[in-house]
Amino acid sequence: MQHSPRIVVIGAGAAGLNVAARIRRVAPQHAVTIIEPAEHHFYQPLWTFVGGGVFPRERSRRDMADVIPDGVRWVREAAGEFKPDENLVITHSGERLGYDALVVAPGIQINWRAIPGLKESLGTQGVCSNYSYDSVNSTWEQLEALRSGEAIFTFPTTPIKCAGAPLKIMFLAEDYLRRTGSRAAVNVRYRCGVGTIFRAPKYAQELVKIAAARAVDVRYKQDLVALRPDSREAVFRDTDSGNELVEKYTMIHVAPPMGPPDFIKQSPLADGAGWVEVDKHSLQHVRFPNVFSLGDASSLPTSKTAAAIRAQGPVLTANLLAVLRGQAPRARYLGYTSCPLVTGYGRLMLAEFDYDLQPCETFPFDQGKERRSMYLLKKYLMPTLYWQGLVRGRNWPWPIPEFGLPRA
Ligand SMILES: Cc1cc2nc3c(=O)[nH]c(=O)nc-3n(C[C@H](O)[C@H](O)[C@H](O)COP(=O)(O)OP(=O)(O)OC[C@H]3O[C@@H](n4cnc5c(N)ncnc54)[C@H](O)[C@@H]3O)c2cc1C
């Protein structure tokens, strides 16, 4: 007798959960296994608000056991090795799991140690970061304590998850200082490792204007390469000239360098840069047809966000099930991603764009403007859409503003 098709999913983040839940709903006869070592799942988009003092960090965390879809087997450890020619994944403890189709979604790796001085000082001596559950409270602590001096916000040269997040916390901090009467005594500086404030030009133009109107000192191609916590100095390298510049800080919010997880980089699934090498439209691996990837660990050349996963999940699911039926993958992802760019308490510009960085907006008004309604959407509606929709593999109450997306 034939066994039911076995699908193994690596990672129970936004991406892995979305796909696992979808498959359980549309093809319950399939045996789905998730490999995931963490005891908690995090709604990371909330960390912007946690760092800005709006929500306690506990609101972003749920027990993993509560979000793993019913009927899915959970292997509580890390995947370590791939043997795609034998359709095998091997876990850290040596368990060998065979599959008919594999979904690889272990997220992005944060390389805290790539900046000397960062890991040791994180959460103390003015150093903070919204980029982990452990450090996110330190952002609000530093901000609340800040009365005068230099507040620096960094953006690295590597790909990162939510490329808007370093900007959002900078704008929230600036607004907080203004509201509490300390703004005149604090220089707010944004140090960007790359040459633009945001990739999609429509929103970048507005962000540059907003930063100028708020007297933020923005510099480009300044890559944070070291911290000297004892003297509260940040060392930047100018990516054009290679020269080093040292700046004093009272507080510094660091968006750390990131990259593909080491175990992916060292695997046969990786592209030259270390990401899971998939076709950018079908999400199918370019060498192993029964392997798929989405989310932050994938090679998809779009901004790494949970919002992008909302559009990738249905495409991947439809294509994976087609391949298991012996059909060609026909569903196409066109690069949809979104970034709710918080520009202050009560203000937000909702960026939505595709692979060509062209806007593909949901609402029938110009989303390139700061709006209170969009802030309320992020603060109150998006958490519900995440917990009730994304991680449960359900579609949004409104369609993705992208032509031709099939639904699974
Ligand atoms: C501060 C901040 C703000 C953000 N703001 C937004 C926003 O406003 N909007 C938005 O859309 N997105 C935002 N994001 C980005 C969003 O959270 C990520 O893009 C999304 O979570 C990526 O999902 P993922 O499943 O690919 O990775 P993750 O959600 O990071 O999950 C990866 C999972 O894989 C597991 N894993 C790792 N290694 C292994 C292994 N070896 N074996 C098995 N499992 C493994 C991990 O434990 C984890 O559970 C933000 C992120 C941050 C940090």
Image (cartoon, rainbow, N blue to C red):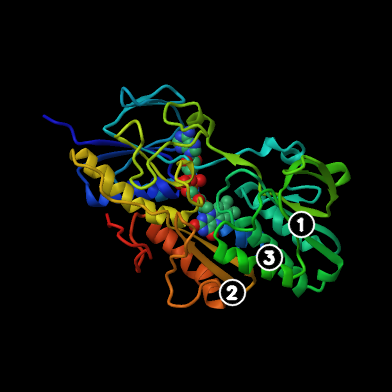
Q: Which residue is mark 1?
A: 142
Determine contact: label 1, label 2, CB under 8 Å: no
- Left or right of 345? Residue 357 is left
Q: Nearer the viewer, residue 337 or 208?
A: 208
Of circles 3 and 2, the one toward us is 2
Q: Where is residue 218, by image quadrant?
A: bottom right
Q: Position of residue 308 (x, y in %)?
A: 44, 54
Instruction: Tell me if I can see residue 60 in this picture.
Output: no
Q: Secondary structure at mark 3?
A: helix
Q: Earlier in the sequence, mark 3 or mark 1?
A: 1
Q: Where is residue 311, by image quadrant?
A: bottom left
Q: Which residue is mark 2?
A: 370
Q: Position of residue 214 (x, y in %)?
A: 74, 71
Q: Which mark is residue 171?
A: 3
Q: Nearer the viewer, residue 226 or 14?
A: 226
Q: Residue at x 22, y 36 (%)?
A: 5
Identify whether 23 is placed above or below 342: above
- Left or right of 390? Residue 57 is right
Residue type for callout 3:
Phe
Disc 3 packing (10 Å; few <14; some 14–19; many ≥20): many
Give the Cα distance between marks 1 and 2. Answer: 26 Å
Residue type for callout 2:
Glu
Q: Nearer the viewer, residue 391 or 373?
A: 373
- Left or right of 87? Residue 123 is right
Instruction: Tell me if I can see residue 237 in this picture.
Output: yes
Of circles 1 and 2, the one toward us is 2
